[in-house]
Every structure is written in C-alpha cells, then in structure tokens.
Amino acid sequence: MAKTKKPDPRPVEPAGSLDEVRAAAQDCRRCDLWARATQTVFGAGAAHHAVMFVGEQPGDVEDRAGEPFVGPAGTLLREALTEAGFDRSDVYLTNAVKHFKWTPRGKKRLHEKPNRGEVLACRFWLEQEIAHIEPRAIVALGATAAQTVLGPSVRVLRDRGTPIASPLAPLVTLTVHPSSILRAPDAESRHAARRQFVADLRKIRKQL
Ligand code: URA
C-alpha cells in the first residue's frame, strides 16, 4: 500500500508517452485494489487539449470492459454531454481511481467507495494523464473526483458549475456524478436531477 500523503496540486512532468503510461498502469500495484479487479481501467478519448471528465472509479461494467463510463452512469453521461453540445471527439473520460472496488452481495458486485489511501495512490496516473493531455478543462464528477482534483475544501452542491482556480488547467470545475442521478428516489426527481446536470454541462461548455 502506498503511503498516504497530501496531494500536491501542481502539474507534474509527463513520463514517456501516454500509451506507455497506459501500458504501465495495467500492472499497477500502488494499492491493493488490483487484486480483486479484472483489469486497470485507464482513461480514454481525445488526447491533446481535450476536455477531461474525471469520475470516481470504474463500475462493474467498466471493470469487465476495460473502458471508462460504458455502464449505466456512463450512458447517462455520454447522452448528457451530447445534449449539452460537447463534441465527443473533444472529450477524454477517466477516473480518480483506476480499479473497481467492490463488495459481494449474493451474485452481485456492489460498488464500494475508495478510501483516501487508494485515491492518493492512484493520483499518480491521473497526474500523468493531465501532464500528457494538457486539458483545456477538467470537470470533476462527484465528491471523490472533486476532492482528488481540487482538494478537500470543495463542495459539490455548493460549487457545481463554478470555475475554481487551479494550476492544472485553464478551466477546472465540477458537477455531480451521473450515478447520483440514477440513484434519485423517483422518476420526477431523477428527471429534475438530469436537467440540472445537463444545465451544468452547458454552463461549463460556454466557459471553454
Ligand atoms: N462511474 C465512474 O465514476 N466511472 C466510471 O467509469 C463508471 C462509473
């Protein structure tokens, strides 16, 4: 297990090429999550100067597929991005943690939130993605990603859609995680949460 240390918000130097970093991440042992995951799920999408969306960690579907945001939350995100006017060829999708953390419930694998040590251990890979891609904007989705990118003082509901000064990219901001919309208790609140999410994404796009 890697030592828990405070994240340094400054950009790091890129090591090798992004493809080399992605290949090295496949053998990551920086924390123990690799042992129960199918594979490392590295970021994917447009490379240079993309708009980078950072989620929490791959889910069950992503763990099997080896690609970020291809399960139910990912489908919602991809549809919302299109509705908000993002060009998918200009977007890079990744996660704060690159292995699926889960707990068994019958035959299901239930998502378990990564702890601080796991997030900090995995930050190395996110820093490398940022160093290589030099994103025009970084959008953190939900609290785990927001705190990984922006530190502990951000609050998702208070700060959603607001630009936050950071040396990591010209625009750094946040909104809710799409899976929070899927967890809304009924159809009406789910629709309202989805509308607000698309409105945040539109507001972010206009700031680019
Ligand atoms: N949730 C995330 O945070 N990331 C994914 O890739 C899928 C679901």
Image (cartoon, rainbow, N blue to C red):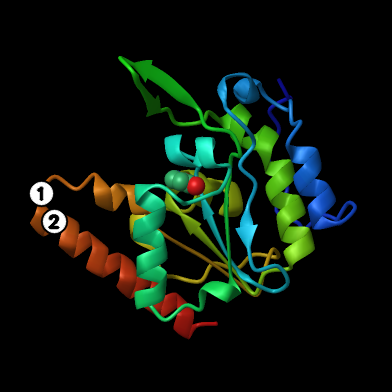
Does 32 sit above or below residue 166? above
To which residue does mark 1 refer? 186
Whether ligand 1 has any atom under 8 Å from the Cβ at mark 2 is answered as no
Instruction: Give the class, few, some or many, for how many residues have Cα within 10 Å of label 1's Cα (few <14, many ≥20).
Output: few
What's the residue at 33%, 18% (across, down)? 107
Does 6 sit above or below residue 21? above
For residue 29, the mark is none
What's the residue at 44%, 34% (across, down)? 60
Residue type pointed to by label 1:
Asp
For residue 189, the mark is 2
Taking the image as shown, residue 120 lies to the left or right of residue 88, namely right
CB within 8 Å, label 1 to label 2:
yes
Residue farthest toward the front in the current orientation of the protein? 65
Q: Position of residue 114 (x, y in %)?
A: 51, 31
Residue type pointed to by label 2:
Ser
Q: Position of residue 31 (x, y in %)?
A: 68, 24
Image quarter (top left, top right, bottom left or bottom right) of the N terminus: top right
Q: Position of residue 14 (x, y in %)?
A: 85, 56
